Image (tube, coloured by chain):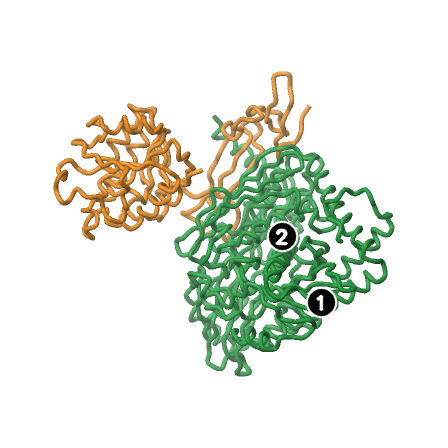
């Protein structure tokens, strides 16, 4: 017995369970709750495949078609944005990596549980208020996000370089509006877990996901983020407009690296500050 | 005391009386609308049908909608309820009153849509309300006509009235009337708009009073309660026939490098629908935001169009719908977010995602899947203003959106140049007579529909220039749904349409064509520098040409499954070219006779399908 699922697809009820299958050839794709698309042939074609008058889409968008892997019938067709290397999207301090890893770094919206999320703000201290500082742009964009995080009761940890501790420069940038209950740590390593102070805090707060802000992407964020995912099993969220690096190369290198860490690339999500919401 | 519409239906009226009265209520709402159209004098009321006329019960619940867009009817209900609430604390609601409201932070969709609501009394008792809106010709916003791409907050978008008594016990408050119309650029036109609304309300009041006199309050009240229950029960019954599930859709507007994405999840359980807009982008500082009540109205409209199109349109169709919209987002902005372009951008997008998820829901039902019609998204819009050929200021919408092509259906093509949403189109002769514009062409646009087993309807393309303008230029406003994906989406292998665009060609050779008395058939003959317009104000000068393609519908099913004979007819009608017939549909036609080359067509299509499998895992 079968019932329609969509054009050319049906749900077949069998003794072994319910299956989504091609209604033309009966080829089984997945269980009724499964990802049937994952078992299909997917092809990306130029916009002109849809006909003329699509030239404005060239280079920015592609037609993506999904076919039955057995009989070739078309299940779906949609216009998708091309991979980031063809895009002109730019962010305050970063943009998706041009070099493809195992995962795209194109920003996608994420919804996080505030009860299990912590924000780690790297090197957003008073030095960032200097207009010549590479992360100066974040002094304007990050505070609004921190307000949203605090409103959702997400804890924030500030990290300042060990060599600035005790100096006038060790103050957190005023626009960040650091709260008295938000710790400031001064680990003497690019991997900010190294001093041993941060992990107990994260564990005490029941943290499962860390949002990294600040920089540099290719030093503190890369080293700390790698340890967070690989050693401690945290999920890591990287808002591309919430981190900085000294050059495009350094930014792209760092982002690329996070997508190729063996067995760990799925631990990283790439988004924007506005793309993060708390449920 | 009025019977509650959700009271048990134990005192059912006999079916004949029920039918007579429910049809009569529908006719009264329709007559109210046709009065607006006939008394009105502006292009919006007389040609475009850009108005609403509906009837409500005494508590503000929707009673009869005539032929109005459902989302405006929903907003009319919010308007009635807000007036009841607001005037309870001032000088009350009296027989013969009429109230003016256009505040999007109360119940309007944008300020240009001016709502008027009037109580209907019978023998001294409040028995119902009539509500109308007209999209007035100007509202004193930053850009003439209302839609203001440069506005960053609502205070720049014209006069905003949260509710004021315009007619007091049958007497027009001239001081209020003059104040309102003189805050616009066209007081004479706006006066016409308001006056035709008041005429509509007077007709509705008279007809309703005649109805009450003929049948008595108790009977009419019982019928209206039963009408609402009947619609609710009908919709719930249909919902129960469809499998439960969850469906997602998103759509992104884009202009000047900025993007605004609307995300929607539809959850159906039993006979209840929940539309959840969680994940939608934060509100914009451009007027694409859509107020909450309009977002709700878009969901209501989607349900009416897909599942309730033949049920009496009243409050009963509200009840199975729940809408969740996070505050501070595009679909539920907070003050002072601008909204002047809302109806044709955020609003069009809301309707697009709503009907798209409803289509996905219907696809799982053997009984309802044939009701699917791919949703047209919206496309671009344009207004012009300036000095006309008579030396006076004018402002008008080009109002061509009804010439969009509708989306394909599950068993038929979309409809050519027919947006199918109650609005109608201005004629070229009227525009040329009243505005300093000369149209070079307005015609079906070839090859822009979404291809599919059933293709999207063909929309129009047109081009015009400035003509006999005293100062050689007019102002333009480019709005609508901006972005390259505004061709929407196809369904189940159908393709989206080509993007709807507004292109300004500056410095063309049009002047020499006119001097030589020749008509350019294509834009290529004219030359000039092309600019694709985002949301913007711009100028059109002598020898500039504005080219405009409307939105068109997406296709349904794979183009390779389309009947070759249907493709041949499309080519014969000059809606599709020979090249597209072959390259997109895989149909080979004889160049001279247009006969289908069956063996060659089968060969091309077989080869394409084999190519689909080349990358099989």
| For marks 2 and 1 on the same chain, the one whose residue lies earlier in the sequence | 1
- Identify the hue of chain A: orange
Percent x, y for residue B474? 48, 74
> Residue extending furthest top?
A15
In this view of the protein, can residue B208 be seen by the observer?
A: yes
Label 2 vs label 1, nearer the camera: 1
Q: Residues within 10 Å of mark 1 (few under 14, many from 20)?
A: some
Percent x, y for residue B479? 49, 61
- Identify the hue of chain B: green
Residue situated in front as seen by the camera: B485 or A207 = A207
Q: Is residue A229 left or right of residue B178?
A: left
Percent x, y for residue B151? 43, 63
- Indicate which disc residue B95 carries: 1
Q: Residues within 10 Å of mark 2 (few under 14, many from 20)?
A: many
Q: Is residue A131 left or right of residue B288?
A: left
Q: Is residue B376 above or below residue B157?
A: above
Q: Residue drawn 85% across and 61% down?
A: B214
Percent x, y for residue B357? 58, 41
Q: Residue drawn 34% across and 41% down?
A: A239
What is the secondary structure assignment of the residue under circle 1?
loop
Mark 2 and mark 1: Cα distance apart in space: 44 Å
- Total labels: the figure holds 2
- Indicate which disc residue B185 carries: none
**Residue wearing tag 2:** B406
Q: Chain of mark 2?
A: B
Q: Chain of mark 1?
A: B
């Amino acid at each position: 017995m079968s019932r329609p699922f969509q054009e050319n697809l049906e749900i077949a009820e069998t003794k072994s369970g319910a299956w989504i299958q091609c209604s033309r050839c009966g080829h089984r794709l997945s269980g009724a709750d499964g990802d049937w698309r994952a078992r299909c042939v997917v092809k990306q074609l130029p916009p002109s495949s849809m006909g003329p008058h699509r030239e404005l889409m060239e280079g920015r968008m592609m037609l993506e078609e999904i076919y039955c892997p057995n009989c070739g019938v078309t299940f779906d067709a949609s216009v998708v944005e091309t991979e980031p290397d063809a895009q002109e999207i730019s962010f305050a301090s970063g943009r998706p990596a041009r070099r493809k890893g195992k995962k795209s770094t194109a920003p996608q919206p994420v919804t996080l549980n505030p009860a299990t999320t912590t924000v780690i703000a790297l090197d957003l201290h008073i030095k960032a208020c200097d207009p010549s500082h590479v992360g100066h742009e974040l002094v304007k964009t990050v505070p609004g996000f921190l307000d949203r995080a605090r409103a959702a009761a997400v804890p924030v940890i500030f990290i300042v370089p060990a060599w600035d501790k005790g100096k006038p420069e060790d103050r957190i940038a005023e626009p960040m509006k650091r709260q008295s209950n938000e710790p400031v740590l001064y680990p003497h390593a690019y991997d900010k877990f190294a001093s041993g102070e941060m992990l107990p805090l994260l564990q005490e707060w029941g943290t499962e996901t860390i949002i990294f802000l600040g920089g540099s992407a290719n030093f503190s964020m890369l080293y700390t983020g790698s340890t967070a995912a690989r050693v401690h099993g945290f999920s890591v969220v990287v808002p591309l407009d919430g981190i900085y690096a000294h050059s495009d190369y350094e930014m792209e290198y760092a982002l690329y690296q996070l997508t190729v860490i063996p067995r760990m690339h799925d631990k990283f999500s790439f988004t924007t500050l506005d793309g993060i919401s708390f449920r | 005391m009025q019977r509650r519409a959700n009271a048990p239906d134990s005192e059912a009226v006999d079916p004949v009386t029920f039918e007579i009265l429910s049809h009569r209520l529908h006719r009264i709402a329709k007559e109210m609308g046709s009065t607006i159209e006939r008394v009105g004098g502006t292009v919006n009321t007389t040609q475009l049908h850009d108005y609403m006329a509906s009837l409500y019960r005494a508590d503000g619940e929707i009673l009869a909608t005539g032929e109005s867009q459902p989302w405006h009817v929903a907003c009319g209900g919010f308007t009635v309820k807000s007036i009841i609430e607001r005037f309870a604390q001032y000088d009350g609601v009296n027989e013969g009153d009429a109230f003016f409201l256009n505040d999007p932070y109360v119940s309007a969709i944008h300020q240009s849509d001016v709502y008027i609501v009037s109580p209907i009394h019978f023998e001294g008792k409040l028995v119902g309300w009539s509500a109308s809106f007209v999209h007035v010709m100007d509202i004193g916003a930053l850009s003439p006509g209302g839609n203001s791409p440069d506005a960053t907050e609502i205070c720049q978008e014209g006069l905003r009235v949260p509710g004021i008594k315009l007619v007091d016990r049958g007497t027009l408050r001239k001081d209020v009337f003059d104040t309102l119309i003189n805050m616009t650029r066209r007081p004479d036109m706006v006066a016409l708009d308001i006056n035709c609304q008041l005429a509509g309300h007077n007709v509705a009041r008279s007809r309703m009073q005649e109805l009450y006199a003929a049948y008595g309050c108790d009977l009419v009240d019982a019928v209206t309660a039963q009408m609402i229950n009947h619609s609710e029960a009908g919709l719930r019954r249909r919902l129960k026939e469809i499998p439960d599930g969850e469906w997602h859709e998103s759509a992104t507007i884009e202009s000047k490098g900025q993007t605004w994405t609307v995300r929607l999840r539809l959850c159906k359980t039993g006979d209840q629908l929940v539309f959840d807009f969680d994940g939608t982008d934060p509100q914009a500082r451009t007027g694409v935001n859509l107020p909450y009540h309009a977002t709700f109205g878009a969901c209501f409209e989607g349900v009416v169009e897909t599942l309730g199109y033949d049920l009496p349109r009243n409050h009963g169709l509200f009840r199975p719908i729940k809408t969740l919209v996070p505050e501070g987002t595009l679909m539920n902005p907070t003050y002072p977010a601008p909204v002047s372009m809302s109806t044709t951008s955020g609003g069009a997008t809301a309707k697009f995602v709503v009907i798209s998820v409803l289509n996905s829901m219907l696809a799982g039902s053997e009984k309802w899947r044939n009701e699917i019609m791919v949703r047209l998204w919206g496309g671009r819009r344009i207004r012009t203003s300036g000095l006309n050929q008579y030396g006076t200021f004018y402002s008008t919408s080009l109002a061509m959106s009804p010439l969009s092509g509708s989306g394909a259906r599950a068993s038929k093509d979309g409809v050519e140049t027919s947006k199918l949403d109650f609005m109608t189109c201005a004629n070229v002769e009227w525009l040329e007579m009243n505005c300093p514009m000369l149209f070079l062409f307005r015609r079906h646009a070839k090859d822009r529909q979404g291809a599919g087993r059933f293709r999207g309807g063909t929309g129009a393309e047109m081009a015009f220039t400035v003509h006999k303008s005293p100062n050689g230029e007019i102002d333009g406003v480019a709005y609508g749904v901006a972005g390259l994906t505004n061709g929407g989406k196809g369904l189940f292998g159908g393709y989206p349409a080509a993007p709807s665009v507004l292109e300004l060609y500056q410095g063309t050779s049009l002047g020499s064509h006119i001097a030589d008395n020749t008509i350019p058939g294509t834009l290529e003959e004219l030359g000039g520098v092309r600019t694709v317009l985002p949301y913007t104000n711009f100028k059109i000068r002598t020898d500039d040409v504005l080219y405009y393609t409307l939105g068109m519908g997406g296709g349904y099913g794979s183009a390779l499954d389309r009947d070759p004979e249907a493709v041949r007819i499309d080519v014969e009608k000059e809606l599709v070219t020979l090249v597209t017939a072959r390259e997109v549909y895989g149909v080979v036609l004889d160049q001279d006779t247009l006969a289908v080359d069956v063996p060659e067509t089968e060969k091309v299509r077989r080869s394409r399908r084999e190519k689909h499998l080349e990358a099989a895992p």
